[in-house]
Image (tube, rainbow, N blue to C red):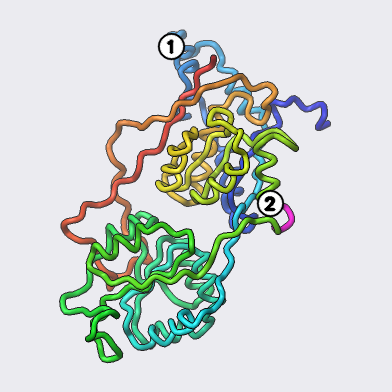
Amino acid sequence: MDEEQRPAERGATVLLTRSAAQGAAFARALAEEWEAERAAKPSAREGTSEETCENTREGDNGEGPRDPSQDRLRNAAAPRVLFAPLQQARTVPATEELRGIPALLESGVYAWVSFTSAHTVRACAELWGEDFARAVHAGGARIACVGAATARAVRAQLGLDADFQPSVQSAAGMLAELEGPAAGAVSTDSAAAGPDSTKPATVLVLEGSNARPTLREGLKNLGWSVTARVLYDMVPAERVEPGELSLSAARALLRGADAPNPDVIVATAPSRLHALLDGAPALGPESAPPVVAIGATTASACRALNLRHVQADSPSPRDLARAAVSLIRRIPHAGSPQLRPHISIEVFRRDHEPHPPSPPPAHHRSHALPRRRDHPAPLAVDSGVLRARRH
C-alpha cells in the first residue's frame, strides 16, 4: 500500500536537532498543530500565499477557484519527525580548580550561580553531586536559570529551586531583568572578600566551552564580578540511541544520499546548525531546507548562512511546532521532492506592534532582583514570514 500511496500524501519530514527524549514534547505538539491546521477553515489560516489571495478575490463571495493546497493539507499524512542530536555534551575532567567550587560556594563569596542550559545542570550534578546543593544552602547563593527547562533540570537533578527566571528565555533576557550588585558589595577579587563578607558581588557562571560571551560581558557591564567555569564540551553525536540519527547520518540525509531531503529543519542551537551544514559544503542556501530557529542567536546564524528561516515566538515545543507547520504548508507537495516545483522563499519582517511583555513567571520570586527602572522591557523578535513564489 505504501508503494501505491501518492507521494503528495506521504507527509512532510521534519529534522529536529534534539534527541528523541528531548524532542518528544515537540513531536506531540507538531502532531496536534498539524491536526488543527487540517481542520481549520482556509480563512482562518495565516499567511496565505499570493496565489491563494488572488484566487480568493476572483469570487464575489470569497469563493474563487479551489486552492489545491487545501486538498493537499486535508489528505496529507502527519509530518514525520527525525531526531538528530548532532552534538552531545561531555563533562570535563574534575580539575583542582573545579573541585574547589563547593568550598567557595559554602564560604559565601558568590551572590548568584547562573545556569544557561540543562547540559550545564547535568555536568554540575556529575562533578559535585549533593555537595553542590549543600554548599549553595550554606553560602546563601541564589540560582538564576535562563528558562523553564533549565529550572526544571535544576530542581530534578540538583534539588534546588530557581530564584530567578527571566520573562524572555535568553541570556539577553536575563541581563534585561537583573540589577547590578548592591552598594557596598565586594567581589572575590577584592581584598575585602572572604567568609565574613555579607554582600558578595560575584556571579558564578557555569557554562559549556561553546558558550557565547553575552552573559559574562553583560554581567560585568552591570557591575558584577564574574567567575566563569566551563563544565562540558560539545562533541559530535555519533553514538546515539535507537531511533535517532547520528551526525554523519543526518549530514548524509541532508545531501540526499540515502533518502529525500527533510522538508524543514528545526534548529535548537547555532552550534548544531553549523555542525549539520559543515558536513554538506556543496548544499547551497536555496537547496537547503527552510529552518525554524529556536531563538535570536540561531536566527542570526541562519542569516549569516543565508538560509531561509523563521524564528519561533518562544523556545517552547508548542511554538516550535507552530513555526514548523507554518513552513510546511507553504511548501508545495511537502514530503515529495520529486513533485516539488522550484520555489523562492523570501524572509522579511512584519511591520506590527511589539508583542506585549509577558507576565513574570511563577518561578520569578519576590526576592529576586527586579528589573532596572531605566531598562525597557525586551521586545520579542518578530518572526520571519515566508512568501512562496513559483518560477
Q: Looking at the picture, does residue 151 appear above or below residue 379?
A: below
- Which amino acid, by three-letter code, is at mark 2? Ser
Tag of residue 230: none
Disc 2: which residue: 246
Q: Answer left or right for 75 relative to 98.
A: right
Q: Position of residue 328 (x, y in %)?
A: 57, 32
Residues at circles 2 and 1 in contact by the CB criterion of under 8 Å: no
Q: Position of residue 95 (x, y in %)?
A: 51, 79
Helix, strand or loop at label 1? It is helix
Which corner quadrant of the image does residue 216 belong to?
A: bottom left
Q: Residue at x 61, y 28 (%)?
A: 73
Q: Residues within 10 Å of mark 2 (few under 14, many from 20)?
A: many
Q: Is residue 242 magenta?
A: yes
Q: Answer left or right for 92 relative to 211.
A: right
- Which amino acid, by three-letter code, is at mark 1? Arg
Disc 1: which residue: 57
Q: Nearer the viewer, residue 288 or 134?
A: 288
Which corner quadrant of the image does residue 263 belong to?
A: top right
Q: Is residue 220 magenta?
A: no
Question: Which segment is the magenta one?
Answer: 240-245
Q: Residue at x 45, y 76 (%)?
A: 160
Residue 266 in sight: yes
Q: Position of residue 51 (x, y in %)?
A: 49, 15
